[in-house]
Image (spheres, rainbow, N blue to C red):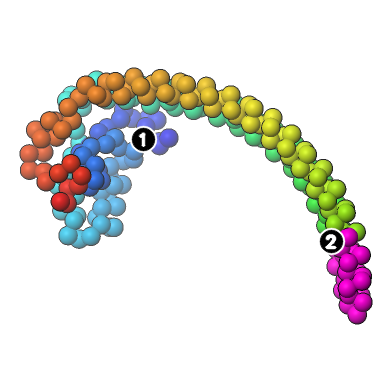
């Protein structure tokens, strides 16, 4: 969620991007203008800046208000989800981390022992290496299985909490979005575009036909 949507009412513009007739601003429009000037082909800059127009609030007041309400609901629902998901993840990490450290504490010296045996017994490499590897593998396998068991349990606990929080968020967000879309469908944005941008070359797909 952008800082703009948190602190200011939503603002709508024609032709923020060349392939869309209108859209909601997701950042200060000065940023987009600066990007166009620096990054777009020179032959496109004047057209892009000329057609980039804010749609007057009073012409789409109820749409703006509904979008603002949706943003507020969606933001609150996401914050509620994060409030549940974050401690669940931290709890998962708190369980997994010591298990991982315990695994590494066992695995590391086993590997060093294997390397020490393998290095000093180069002339009898095949026989010694095989034995050393089997010893390492037996220790590593047991430690890894213990670690995986802890991780699996912790992950299942985390997912159970996260899944419930996600479902609650989805339900709230979906309802708010449907309400917003219902209001948006009442606006003929193409007619408003024709009125406010009479010299625009928009063909339904791009401003560069």
Q: How many marks?
A: 2
Q: Horizontal and vertical percent for residue 134?
A: 88, 60
Nearer to us of marks 2 and 1 is 2
User: Which residue does the numbered mark 1 point to in the structure image?
Assistant: 4
Q: What residue sits 27% from the left and 36% below the top?
A: 23
Along the viewing direction, whichever of 192 and 38 lies nearer the viewer: 192
- Inspect this view and state whether residue 61 appears: no
Q: What residue sits 56% from the left and 25% below the top?
A: 165
User: Which quadrant holds residue 173?
Assistant: top left
Determine whether, in the image, residue 122 is placed left or right of residue 149: right
Sequence-first disc among 2 and 1: 1
Residues under numbered marks 2 and 1 in contact, where contact means CB atoms less than 8 Å apart: no
Q: What residue sits 25% from the left and 48% below the top?
A: 33
User: Which residue does the numbered mark 2 point to in the structure image?
Assistant: 111
169 is higher (above) or lower (below) than 115: above
User: Which quadrant holds residue 179?
Assistant: top left
Q: Horizontal and vertical percent for residue 101?
A: 79, 47
The image quadrant where one finds the N terminus is: top left
Q: Residues within 10 Å of mark 1 (few under 14, many from 20)?
A: some
- Inspect this view and state whether residue 148 appears: yes
Verify whether residue 133 appears in magenta: yes
Q: Horizontal and vertical percent for residue 163?
A: 59, 28
Q: Which residues are magenta?
A: 111-134
Badge 2 marks a residue whose secondary structure is helix
């Amino acid at each position: 969620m952008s800082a703009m949507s948190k602190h200011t009412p939503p603002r709508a513009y024609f032709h923020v991007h060349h392939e869309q007739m209108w859209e909601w601003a997701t950042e200060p429009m000065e940023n987009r203008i600066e990007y166009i000037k620096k990054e777009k082909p020179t032959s496109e800059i004047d057209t892009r800046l000329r057609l980039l127009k804010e749609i007057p609030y009073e012409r789409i007041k109820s749409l703006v208000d509904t979008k603002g309400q949706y943003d507020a609901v969606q933001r609150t629902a996401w914050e509620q989800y994060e409030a549940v998901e974050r401690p669940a993840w931290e709890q998962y990490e708190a369980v997994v981390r010591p298990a991982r450290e315990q695994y590494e504490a066992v695995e590391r010296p086993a590997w060093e022992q294997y390397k020490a045996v393998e290095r000093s017994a180069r002339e009898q490499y095949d026989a010694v290496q095989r034995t050393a590897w089997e010893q390492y593998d037996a220790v590593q396998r047991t430690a890894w299985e213990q670690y995986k068991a802890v991780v699996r349990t912790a992950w299942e606990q985390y997912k159970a909490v996260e899944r419930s929080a996600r479902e609650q968020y989805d339900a709230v967000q979906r309802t708010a979005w449907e309400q917003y879309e219902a209001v948006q469908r009442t606006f003929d944005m193409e007619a408003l575009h024709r009125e406010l941008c009479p010299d625009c070359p928009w063909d339904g797909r791009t401003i560069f036909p």
